Image: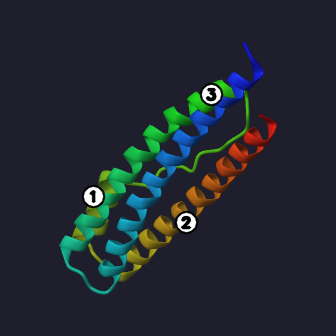
Amino acid sequence: MNRKKELREAIEAARQVLKATDYAINILNKANKWSFLDILGGEGLSSFMKRNHIRSANRAINELKYDIERLRKELGDINIDLPGEISDSLSDNMFDIFFDNIFTDLRVRSEIKGKINELIEFRDMVQSLIQRLEREI
């Protein structure tokens, strides 16, 4: 196969990864806003909304894995680590919503912010990869 064609396919796959990463970051930013409200004393609604966004973000991160796998296939084997999901087990939900307290809220917010930062770093890495591939073309 033509090298330029392979590079273009890799760039296309990387751009899809960027799009999916931006989507996950956007959802986590929404969870972060609800988390802030939860810390300020929001009742069960803010905990519920925060957890709803966390579930959505986890789905987005899971879908992102498929886009990354496609990118890996286009590039061969490259070492890109995807940030993990935010814990959203039943016990986490029960503890966060029903035993709502400042300590739980602060821990969850810290985890959300950490995942946002991981995804931003990951996004920067993919953006650099795209630039490197474009230069090669």
Give the mark nearest the N terminus, 2 or 1: 1
Residue carrying label 2? 114
> From this viewpoint, is residue 117 visible?
yes
The residue under the point 52% across, 35% down is 67
Identify the residue at image location x=30%, y=52%: 90
CA neighbours of label 2 inside 10 A, class few (<14), some (14 to 19), many (20+) = some
Q: Dot 3 corresponds to which residue?
A: 9
Q: Is residue 107 above or below residue 42?
A: above
Residue 73 lies in what quarter of the image? top right
Q: CA distance from mark 2 to mark 3?
A: 31 Å
Q: Secondary structure at mark 2?
A: helix
Q: Which residue is mark 1?
A: 52
Q: Is label 2 or label 3 in front?
A: 3
The residue lying at 26 percent from left, 70 percent from top is: 47
The spot of residue 34 in percent (x, y) is: 31, 73
The amino acid sitting under disc 1 is: Asn
